[in-house]
Amino acid sequence: MKMEGEATTLKRTLAEWKFSQYPKYILLPIDENNEQISSNVKNVVFSEATPIPLENNVRLVCVSVDALANILDMDPDVSNREEFVEFVSGRKLPYGALPIAHRYGGHQYGLWAGQLGDGRAHIIGEYVNSRNERWQLQLKGSGPTPYSRMRDGRLVLRAAIREMVVSEACHYLGVPTTRAAAVIVSDEAVVRDMYYSGCPRRESAAVVLRLAKCWFRFGSLEVLSRAGELTVLRQLTDFIIKEHFPDIHLSDENRFIRLFSDIAHRTLDMVAKWQGLGFTHGLLNTDNMSILGITMDYGPFGFVDSYDSGFVANCSDGEGKYALAKQPDIGLKEERWGDEQLVEKLLDMMQQTGADFTATFRQLAELEPSELVSEVKISEKWSLKRLSSHASWGCWLDQYRERLDKEAVDASSVGMFEDERRRRMLSVNPIYVPRNWILHEAIVDAEKDDFGKVQFLLEVIRRPYDINPEAELRGFSAQPPQWAYALKISCST
């Protein structure tokens, strides 16, 4: 089978598919004693570790058709085969697999937490696809490793679904991110306290197949530096430069400074895209921050609904350390004097009226400036209707229209300028994001073995800027139901 636009024949069975025989990570120090407890691991970057497959009625929840076809060169129909479920569970790994767990440390909430590492994830191999891209495949929830710190090494179904849907959504929204290819679930039960409230419950164990060019984090370097393992630190840093930062030459005596600068700028670009979408990661510890500047480790994340600069996705972040406004302007083509105040005033009105973040900017894009003064037109846009109840709406609207007029005067045609403004705004302000209440409904069904909503949500987020008639019928872009505003985001995964 060939997918549209594909020159490569996709693999129909796992017998046809195999890992790269020599993954690049074998060039780095690997601890071969996988019985060794993590506190004794020194001068290594990885430890050998074997996945522990899920038992008891293991079944497929969902897949990313795009990730399978365009990253892994797999015919999506391969996911209908039992061998694919065994692959994702870690029971039957293809030729060339070399399972390892990564050692890293991290600052958590500003304090050094020591050595951490992959406590429930296994990098199982590398694959070089038909585009000559090298990807590392990782199973999350695949059992304990030398870095599990006495925990069970498992992932619950709700957390697997959240990571699967939102990592794929971020990809289609233009946010640099790890990818997710599939989720499986079993009847094996694990106990989790969802909100750290002292009320644990039994939940189904699941595994998500994740993809990334590499899984190195800030903490990958920190743990070596803190432990004084400078030879391995230099080896890993040079490896990272050679494999992932080709514009930096290993002969450059300032290469480490340039690497630091590149990582900082990539991370800043990523966070700017988060802010533009109202996305809050929830757990910006250095063990969750990729050196590639991509979003990784989706835990207590959230997309803000009613705008609140202090929005905190993580229920364990009591001080709001990782609130929306603390992650470091939308819509205008070029920055001019007064723009910052114009945007700040808009956000202030949104916060005071509870206007929806995603819907407000989308609806501003859908209306022409002349329509913004029409009560009839505004009444058709639920978030703008709420925003227009603010006493300063009229004043702000005058300033906004005046600002647009200034750009229109500079353009060769007012009509062409307006068309370009709307096209630009519509291209960066989505109709659909995986809101917490939508995810919640899909998870509730999935916990009853009905995966239809999860699979449909994955279809919708592939085209977040285009109207989906069925998604409209289900209210995905409508004002959220009242109960959604009180819904808490789970912390424990």
Image: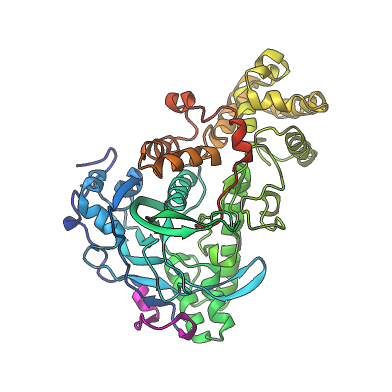
Name the residue located 57 percent from the left edge and 81 percent from the top edge. 225
Q: Nearer the viewer, residue 465 or 476?
A: 476
Residue found 70% across the figure and 54% down from its top: 326
Q: Is residue 30 above or below residue 162?
A: below
Rendered-image quadrant of the N terminus: top left
Q: Is residue 128 visible?
A: no
- Left or right: where does residue 343 sit relative to residue 458? right
Q: Is residue 28 magenta?
A: yes
Q: Is residue 411 left or right of residue 69?
A: right
Residue 239 colored in magenta in the image: no
Which residue occupies the extreme top position in the image? 376
Q: Position of residue 140 (x, y in %)?
A: 40, 60
Q: Residue furthest left?
A: 15
Name the spot of residue 107 as percent of width and height, x first.
61, 70
Across and down, in percent, residue 471 comes to 46, 28
Which range of residues does the magenta coloring cover? 25-43
- 414 vs 209, left or right, is right
Q: Position of residue 25 (x, y in %)?
A: 37, 73
Query: Is residue 62 positioned above or below 56 on the image?
Result: above
Above or below for 451 versus 491: above
Q: Nearer the viewer, residue 368 or 206?
A: 206
Which corner quadrant of the image does residue 41 belong to?
bottom left
Mark count: 0
**Viewer-side residue, 313 vs 280:** 313
